[in-house]
Amino acid sequence: MQLSAALPRLVPGLIRRLAGVHPRWVGLEPLGPAGHPVQRLYFANHSSHLDTPILWSALPAAARARTRPVAAGDYWDRDVRRWLPAGMNAVFVDRCGVAAEACQPMEDALSQGDSLILFPEGTRSLEPRGGVQPFKSGLYHLATAFPAVQVVPVALANVGRMMPKGTLAPIPVRVGVTFGPPVPLRPDDDKSMFLRRAHDALEALMSQGGTP
Amino acid sequence: MIDAQIGAVVAVAVVALVVGTAVGQAVARQARTSAERLAARDLMARIGAWWWMIPLMVCCLALGWPGVVGFFGAVSFLALRELISLVPSRRADHGTLVLAFFVAVPVQYGLIWGQWVELFMVFVPVWALLTVSVGLALRGDPTHFLQRVAAIQYVLLVGVYCISHAPALLMLSVPGYEGQEHKLLVFLVVVTQSSDVLQFLWGKALGRRLLLPSVSPTKTVEGMVGGLGSATVVGTALTPLLPWSLAQTALLALGIATAGALGGLVMSAIKRDAGVKDFGSLIEGHGGVLDRVDSLVFAAPALFHLVRWLHATP
């Protein structure tokens, strides 16, 4: 097998091994019928740069091939910084501009049938075990524009301890990745109601997930 | 470090493993209810793990000093990982935790490698204590300070300091027993590990009364008594390898088996508090590394200091 062909399989396996990831799926299956990936909007708590590679590695290979992390284009702007998310086929969005324009690249990816990994807090929390910050509205816009896409909460445990914000040396703690049941979009939902329900679903999943 | 005596110990262990595998398969075939099938699978997974743990340990002994120090250094690193994964920490602890993994472990095992006995005995209790305390204080986050310092220091003592007493047995010099100190380590590993297995078997066979259900939901009085008794017999059978009389060896075997069982209870309390059954999943059927070596954690320093006291060296 050529190296370029082997890398997409080796790297996630290596990440899973190093971080001790054993993904748990609570109330949903990793893949749809016949092993086909389901189009989903994975949203997770955010406390480390390692959140994205770890969540991405925890997906089954078939789903990972069609899943693109959303990265802040204003932060991951150039050179090595740009290559790391680009290696995971990231969708770059601009957090500084107008909200509607910022959503456009994500809508394009969803229109193509891809799934997304999103951190709706918008930035990393400082304390690994602090609560989940309020959500930005992008999750609601995408959920209403694409009602067929499942909105799936993902609780990440211990990743913020592995490499907290502001540090560059990771420590080898074991991390937990728990996927929860999709958050439904109800007909009478307004923005704050839906975001509140998604926020509560993630917090509930985090508290029941516990340590890995 | 492998001679005829150790070869004989390994041969007996392999025979026990073959018998265990056959019994396990028979039990698995007989299993009717789902609870029985689960117990049988648990037993088979435990036995299966030994099929590669024994060759690994033999290889490390065959490699001699670097193999033994390297093996336990790796065990310490993984045990520390499992413990720190359970301990709540704050962002300000990160730098100190980096030091714990990447400085404290290599230094402690480096001291054993270089046979610096005095420094090996004070490095974690003195120098790591000062470093952890100062390191955390200088970060300027006093939230739950005492709990955070205590947790980091405790996991260093358990995961690094205590476990490092197992390879440190090779630094002891017992008069008239020079060059055979590694057999003390064989004695330690055989007694604690067979005590674990025998407690499990006695518990499964006769276990009625739970020993301490709030701490360990599986340990029984019958398992503990039977396990300690039969592990003492196993340890006494190793008398030809050791520099002591039959009675002395039996007492030491009982002592380290007891220390090991109590250490296992302490680790159960940590797990219970953190809400996890097993510490990790590196070895199939064995939970984490710490679930395998939890009995070694307290037995290793106990044996090390008992031998030093008996022979007043070095």
Image (cartoon, rainbow, N blue to C red):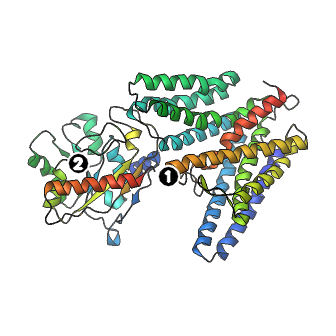
A53 versus B205 height, above or below: above
Q: Is residue B51 left or right of residue B313?
A: left
In the drawing, what numbered circle is on residue B51? none
Protein chain holding label 1: B
Labels 2 & 1 near each other (Cβ < 8 A): no
Name the amino acid, label 2.
Pro
| Percent coordinates x, y for residue B249 in the rendering | 85, 42
| Percent coordinates x, y for residue B115 in the rendering | 70, 25
| Percent coordinates x, y for residue B142 in the rendering | 40, 28
Marks counted in the figure total 2
Quarter placement of the N terminus of chain A: bottom left
- Alpha carbon separation for disc pair 2 and 1: 29 Å
Using the rendered image of the protein, determine whether residue B265 is visible from the camera's viewpoint. yes
Nearest-to-viewer mark from 2 and 1: 1
Name the amino acid, label 1.
Gly
Q: Which residue is drawn at the image coordinates 13% and 38% (left, top)?
A: A96
- Same chain shared by disc 2 and disc 1: no
Q: Which residue is drawn at the image coordinates 34% and 60% (left, top)?
A: A180
Of A24 and B144, nearer the camera is: B144
Using the rendered image of the protein, determine whether residue A109 is visible from the camera's viewpoint. no
Mark 2, Cα crowd under 10 Å, few <14 / some 14-19 / many 20+, is many
Q: Which residue is drawn at the image coordinates 55% and 53% (left, top)?
A: B278
| Percent coordinates x, y for residue B78 in the rendering | 55, 42
Local secondary structure at mark 1: loop
Local secondary structure at mark 2: loop
Mark 1, Cα crowd under 10 Å, few <14 / some 14-19 / many 20+, is few
Residue at numbered disc 2? A120
In the drawing, what numbered circle is on residue B275? 1
Q: Is residue B60 left or right of residue A82?
A: right
B42 versus B9 height, above or below: below
Q: Which residue is drawn at the image coordinates 52% and 28% (left, top)?
A: B103
Q: Is residue B274 left or right of residue A103?
A: right
